[in-house]
Image (cartoon, grey):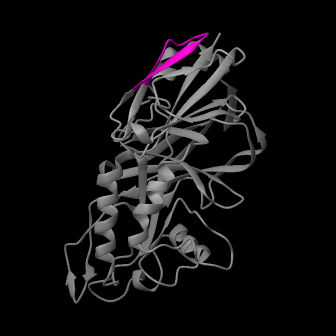
Amino acid sequence: MKKIIFIFFLILSSSSYSQTTPFYRGALLEYFQGHKCPNCPGTDRIADSMQVKYKDSIAIVNIHAGFFASPSTNPFQNDLTTTIGDTLDSLWGVSLYPRGLVSRTNYSIGNSNHLLSKDDWNDTIKKIIRSAPQFLIDHVNNFNSTTKTLNTTTYTITLLNLTGTYYVSVYLTEDSIISPQKNGTIIDPNYVHNNLLRASLNNTWGTLISSGTITSGTLISNNFSYLLNPLWKANKCKTVCFVYDNSNKEVLQISQKYVLDSSSTILSINEKHLPSFDIYPNPTNNFVNIHLQNVKHIDCVTVEIVDMFGKTLLTKKLVDEKINISYFPNGIYFIQLRTEEGVITKKIIKQ
């Protein structure tokens, strides 16, 4: 079931929402490999290092598919493949392993520009998380340990007026799976596989959330139910949710959470390693002061002011921490700071 709620009143009335929630764009890393691939453990190590470096601003999906992943004779009889993984492997045209996609950028039929080696992941992830977001997405899990039924509700909110076709997908992954893996010239019988794709809660391509024009500030909720395989360890499983643009398949925002995490902090998306800032007074009718926190190179900070329709009204280097908005009409605006560490956004009310 889907419902659309216009939340301009929420934005106007909730000071905690506008004051404390940093807006950023997260990245999705999907990579393809198999247990008979001798070079794949090196890819796992790179993926693990990306998770440590970027924390919750990236979600990782480890997809076993293709020739190297097919189950065979001992010790590779375990089947770590999935139907959805095989479909994605075919669609993206993966012929060399390991290869990965970062937020499915640069996809077009007939080329392989979207398929990246592990050495190219970091720069692409960095570029994405430094770009301004168009969506926020959060989700809530409720897991019944008796029936093994998972209910996941996604909440997607638009930050701009958008025109296009957008979908939300919910993948299920599992950590700490012990299964043999070829590692160079040896076979490790106790290899630990993390972020392994297990299933999708809403098929390969997800669920349509908007087609046409969608207004900034629109909140869309969807609910999905899935029965977990009893052999999977629920306490090691995660839900990875993402919203993407159907025209080019590019992932625009992500959210990830462990299955047993039933917290309901709607849109309380946190980015721990990004800088932050406070704005005051808010509301204001004249100047707004910007107080920076955890910014390494202040001379590299650019400030942008964007209206509710997504139009950029001002772009300048942040020479001082006071911005004049007295000449703007009364209304709601977003202040975006572009730093070397990323992009963060907060709302300001001019009255």
178 is higher (above) or lower (below) than 26:
below
Question: Who is closer to the viewer here, 325 or 170?
Answer: 325
Q: Residue at x 44, y 49 (%)?
A: 239
Judge whether 77 appears above or below 229 on screen.
below
The answer to if 284 sits in the magenta stretch is: yes
In the picture, which quadrant includes the C terminus?
A: top right
**Residue shown at the point (49%, 32%) measured from the top left:** 318
Q: Residue visible at 32% across and 89% down? A: 73
> Which residue appears farthest toward the right when viewing the image?
212
Question: Magenta includes 270?
Answer: no
**Residue 264 rendering spot, x and y as whole percentages:** 44, 29
Looking at the rendered structure, the number of numbered marks drawn on it comes to 0
Q: Is residue 113 above or below residue 339?
A: below
Q: Is residue 258 visible?
A: no
User: 3 or 349, which is in the foreground?
Assistant: 349
Can residue 184 be seen from the camera position used here? Answer: yes
Residue 120 place in picture, x, y as percent:
43, 69
Residue extending farthest to the front is 319
| Magenta segment | 278-291
The quarter of the picture where the N terminus appears is: top right
Of the pair 323 and 231, the residue shown nearer to us: 323
Q: Position of residue 272 (x, y in %)?
A: 34, 38
Q: Is residue 25 left or right of residue 69?
A: right
User: In terms of image quadrants, where is residue 331?
Assistant: top right
